Image (spheres, rainbow, N blue to C red):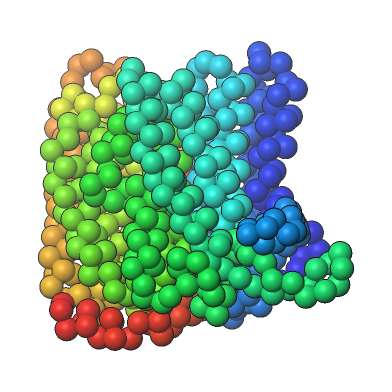
Amino acid sequence: MDLGFPILSVLTFLPVLGMIVIALIHKDNVKIIRTVTIAVTALQIVFSIVLWMTFDTTLAGINDPNSFQYIERVPWIRIAGLGIFGNVSIDYFMGIDGLSVTMILLTSLISFVGAIASFSITKQHKGYFMMYLLLVTGMMGVFCALDFFLFYIFWELMLLPMYFLIGIWGGPRREYAAIKFFIYTLFGSVFMLLVMIGLYFSTVVTGIDPATGQQISYHSFSIIDMMNPANMTMGIFATIGDTWRYIGYGALFLGFAIKIPRFPFHTRLPDAHVEAPTAISVILAGVLLKMGTYGILRICFGIFPEIAVATSQYMVIFGFINIVYGAFCAMAQTDLKKLIAYSSVSHMGYVLLGMAALNSQGMVGAIFQMFNHGTITAMLFLSVGVLYDRAHTRGLNEFGGLANKMPKYFALVVICYFASLGLPGMSGFISEAFVFLGAFQTWQFWTILSTLGIILTAAYMLWALQRMFLGKLPERWEGLTDINGRELVSLVPLAAIVIFLGIYPSPILDLMTTSVNQLVAFVQAAGPKAIEAATIIR
């Protein structure tokens, strides 16, 4: 697919252009700074819609270099003849398939919503919006990159703005939360870096040297090259099923699991959410968590498929733990933001459950759950921000009777709460249904246990709804005003998407189905004996 211009680069680096423009604007021109940010993120939505409308759903991508779309590949770093290191080749390599296009749509949507929510920021606007746009570039780049070196750069790029956005514009314990977030994520990134280097020296491909016209062999950072076993001809990852491949898969999985966050690496998430500004909580839960599961699908499953099959039982167990443990933790919270943070831990467990199924239904459900959780949890955190901006408290036990005082707000909260608990007619129901359909085929026992999460989610969501909105309104909240126009602009589109995809999910499902089928076939072909053994163990 070729649109005649590098749309993926435009999508990725448009926020950097916005940063430059904001840098030239005087810090007191807050309205112009906000307008530039809104314009940039709105343009990203326009380009994402172009991708969506022109995307060829018959092309799989995954391990087929000829079926990726909107490819941009140019030589970036070329060093020839470095002794034992051979020829170094790093490309600026971008392209998308059904896995990444859904995440690009989600990222552009949540970035725009977050920019609107950022209007509540009251200090150092220029620095905040510059960091915000840099964060958007990092997120978008991760979903577009097909070169592991480039992927890693975008992955690490997000750490800097997130650290400052939490540490400067966050709550009372912002420094602690920012440092904890940074250290956790950086810890996982170190393992990713080591495996990336090992994969680079294990992957050898042949090509034509553009300078001499001669055929040469060189190491490659291309994720697609790394997925081809024929290119794994040397180094520690060359032998299929070898111990080093287990170690490599485990190290990569650890780096991505911290980002999800998977139990027991979940403790950074509630602290970061509680202290982060509303817009950053929206970005963190709406997009950043999905980068962990995307990395597992794209890189762990793609490069180490036989290890993914052999260890799938452990993934389903951790998925179950995330679902149930996260739900129990949410039930124990009296801070509304912490409740939603732990609900994210629980709902990302459904993604792990669907991925562990290693079949098309489970995988489709997992990726659709990534998209749906992004929109639903964005609504949840935005709803918290609406109330906190007025009451300056998030205590569940401090409210009551808000339904009559804030009816418009109450209506939107009902939509996102019921979507979160998986009510039929809402998008969350569709994705969770596919997850359970797929997982039950492979892991019947763990799937049955995981359905406990549905009951627990309904319990803590309805309990929170009852405590906040029903009963008698305390006298001190008599002055509260209903949701305003700006807040409606950020919440209503998300509510519309949640309801629309709950009734008619095909526009998103059609984007990913061909790629998911290809990924499942690729993984299953790598380890049929392990899949058979896993089925017996269930």
Judged from this view, the residue extending furthest toward the right is 212
**Image position of 390 (left or right of 19):** left
Residue found 46% across the figure and 52% down from its top = 194
**Residue 227 vertical position relative to residue 91 in the rendered view, above or below:** below
Residue beneath the point at 69% across and 43% down: 14
Front-most of 67 and 411?
67
Q: Is residue 529 visible?
A: yes
The image quadrant of residue 530 is: bottom left
Q: Position of residue 43 (x, y in %)?
A: 68, 46
The image shows residue 389 at horizontal and vertical percentages of: 38, 23
- The answer to which of 172 and 456 lies nearer the viewer is 172
Question: Residue at 52% of width from left, 15% of height from top?
Answer: 123
Looking at the picture, tell me which residue is in the foreground, 258 or 53. 258
Q: Which quarter of the rendering shows the N terminus?
A: bottom right
Question: 264 above or below 510?
Answer: above
Nearest the camera: 268 or 83?
83
Q: Position of residue 456 (x, y in %)?
A: 14, 52
